[in-house]
Image (cartoon, rainbow, N blue to C red):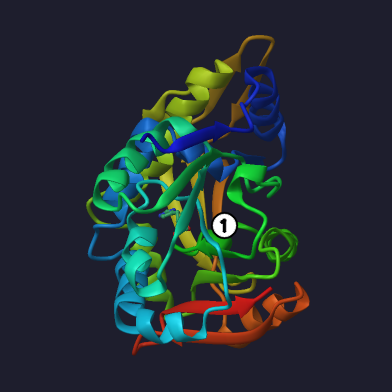
Amino acid sequence: MKPRLIQLDRADPGAIRDELLRGLRDDPAAIPPKYFYDALGARLFAAITELPEYYPTRTEAAIFARHADAMARLLPAFEALVDLGAGNCEKAARLFAPFGVRRYVAVDIAVDYLGESLDILRRQHPQLDMLGVGLDFSAHLALPAEAGAGPRLLFYPGSSIGNFTPAAALAFLRRARAAAQGGGLLIGVDLVKPVAVLEAAYADPLGVTAAFNRNVLAHVRRVAGADFSLADWGHVAFYNAGESRIEMHLEAVRDVAVRWPGGERRFAAGERIHTENSYKWRVADFAALLVEAGFRDLHHWTDDKGWFGVFLARA
Ligand code: AVI
């Protein structure tokens, strides 16, 4: 039997163009980081996770490998594991056995890509009830009735919460608590650490992160008709200690005019487009955020260096 697939939010091309052009006209100009993930961007991100400098993915995986059984003993009762930003579903699949998962709900922005991942999973876990949901969960978390009425364990790994401002993270966690229907949340969070380690993770010598950053312009060119030339833009990434975040920008290497149907913007050499924030949390501050969002019975695990944290909380 094929896994069921439901697409809830079909992005409207006009709204996407408006959002992007608004960001390009802003001062300073900005492009929302969700536009990194076109087909090539998703592959470049997968390559980033393999880089020696990009510690989050492997550090988080090691925490799960080491502590999954301890986590399983502390889990609230749940009927479905809801994987937010499921992608290839690999991270969640490693938890199926230790957590005794019976229903798996994979959520990502587009259901097309999920279909392939779930087909592969179905062969490995034929007993599992599976559902794929296409949903822009950064905007809302209203899951379809097919996801089930009972308590859910929401799974949000990879420190994607770090791409939200603290205020947006709080709003997201409140929505997650409601969506858990009395179950819980298991979430991966990147932690504050030495600046050199942080900056190397976002400015690797191979230039994969630079390619990932610049590729957003190719995506914007396609969907908003803005005539970016990628060679005009350099990758900039640095740690902003006051805001506790890595910032990524694209910097004009010369004076540049970017034109789109009905408008244009001139950038002076050195002017930047802000493309991403990646917040780094302290354990106590993230625990306080979870409590503020209404979660309780918190547990957390970190690696030996304290670089990454996995939090479990009851909704
Ligand atoms: C998806 N997100 C958690 C990544 C991060 O580390 O903020 C995206 C990324 N940007 C550059 N490298 C990785």
Q: In x, y percent, where is residue 55?
A: 32, 69
Callout 1, which amino acid?
A: Asn
* Residue 251 vertical placement versus 307 (above, below): above
Please name the residue that numbered disc 1 is placed on: 163
Residue at 42% x, 43% y: name it.
Answer: 213
Q: Nearer the viewer, residue 42 or 244?
A: 42
Q: In x, y percent, where is residue 51?
A: 24, 59
* Mark 1 CB within 8 Å of ligand 1: yes
Q: Residue 181, located in which quarter of the rendered image?
A: bottom right
Q: In x, y percent, where is residue 199?
A: 40, 66
Q: Residue 182, located in which quarter of the rendered image?
A: bottom right
Question: In this orientation, does residue 122 appear?
Answer: yes
Residue at 51% x, 63% y: name it.
Answer: 155
Q: In x, y percent, where is residue 118?
A: 36, 42
Report the image quarter containing ligand 1: bottom left
Which element is circle 1 on? Answer: helix
Could you tell me how many numbered marks the image carries?
A: 1
Q: Nearer the viewer, residue 257 or 290?
A: 290
Residue furthest toward the top? 261
* Residue 213 vertical placement versus 280 (above, below): above
Determine whether, in the image, residue 136 is placed left or right of residue 204: right
Determine whether, in the image, residue 214 is placed left or right of residue 204: right
Q: Quadrant of the N terminus?
A: top left
* Residue 15 vertical placement versus 33 (above, below): above
Residue at 37% x, 34% y: name it.
Answer: 2
Q: Quadrant of the C terminus?
A: bottom right
Residue at 58% x, 16% y: name it.
Answer: 259
* Residue 159 vertical placement versus 45 (above, below): below
| Mark 1 Cα shell of 10 Å, populated few (<14), some (14-19), many (≥20) | many
